[in-house]
Image (cartoon, rainbow, N blue to C red):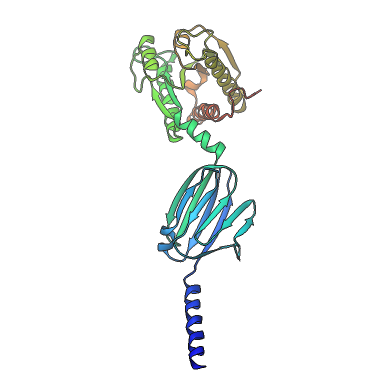
Amino acid sequence: MKKILILIVLLFSVNAKAQDEVNKIVLKYGKHQDFYRFVLICEKPAITYSINVNLLSNGKIKLTFTSPFEIEFEGRIISQDDKIRDLKIYKNENSLIIGTSNITKIKVSRLESPSRLVIDAFFEELAQQEEKIKSASILIDPGHGGQDLGIHVKENSEKNLVLYISKEIASRLAQKGIKVALTRASDEELSLKKRLKIQNTLNPSLFLSLHLSSGDFFFIYTSKIKKNTPKDDPSKIFLKEDNLVKIFIKKIKENFSEPVYSEKLPGTLLIETSSPALLIEIPKRSLFSDKKYLDKIIDTFVNGIMEHFKVKTEKTNYE
């Protein structure tokens, strides 16, 4: 009898020890506009760093654990085949699979205080948009330069104004992950031939030339024809230009009271580029406007470019 009691005590001790060794992890989950965020709060940093995270080919997320574990979500322990909100959860001895919208990209972080594993899971649509933006490149052409002042009144000149606006647009686009270059970054005189050479060397996704208009209005010019269209499908370049014009008109009308016009023009900078190209003239009053007005122009153009590279299809109707 004594031996049986000792055996029972030993078994109880082993079982209690095994129970103690189960790692308790608290799961927090939120759905944001562009991604899901999963936060697994662990008791010890060693547990956080031992969890292996993989994105499966079917868009599910698999977490593999090196020791027994249990997941707590909103005060209850998740079972083997469970559901929390719009997520399906599959759990076995050493892994947890999270099923949700088709995920194509994950970002994993391991943080302290408290020790936690953070998984940002991006939707398929956002991942495609990010790749689209990363592959985008813009060449901005500030008009005039050097001895060519453009429109000028006393000390105010078109060449300096469009250079300032171009640099600001370039800086803000670069912060958003778009590759940007300028035909000129200082007060230098460039011939049309030199500007075209830069364009043809870089072959950007968009060529944008900035000037002042003769009055208080916006004018957007595109090409009637292209001499250097891509061989695969030349019609695509005109479709992109037309969509760009629609986007810019929409954005300008949303933010400005000045009228905006558009026209197809057989200009050298427009017809001899292989890229979609716009020449935009901004209101003459910009020469005398405060920084707030110029910032509004810069923001409008940046937003127009970003919308162009984020549209789902090139045939989106903006009217």
The answer to whether one can see residue 217 in this image is no
Residue 223 higher or lower than 314, as above or below? above
Which picture quadrant has residue 236?
top right
Which residue of the protein is positioned furthest toward the right in this rendering? Answer: 319
Q: Residue at x 64, y 51 (%)?
A: 86
Count of marks placed on residues? 0
Q: Residue at x 50, y 77 (%)?
A: 15
Q: Is residue 304 above or below residue 104?
A: above
Residue in the image at 37% along x and 9% along y: 193
Residue 309 appears in the picture as rendered: yes
Asked if residue 23 lies left or right of residue 314, the reply is left
In this rendering, the answer to whether 146 lies above or below 96 is above
Query: Which one is nearer the viewer's eye here, 159 or 77?
Result: 77
User: Which quadrant, please, contains the C terminus?
Assistant: top right
**Image-quadrant location for residue 190:** top left
Return the residue nearer the eye: 283 or 177: 177
Left or right of 237, for residue 152: left
Percent x, y of residue 273: 44, 13
Q: Residue lying farthest bottom?
A: 2
Q: Quadrant of residue 313?
A: top right
Give coordinates of residue 216: x percent, y percent.
56, 17
Give the residue drawn at x 51%, y 89%: 4
Q: Is residue 191 left or right of residue 20?
A: left
Comparing 156 with 311, the one in front is 311
Residue 98: x and y, percent? 56, 52
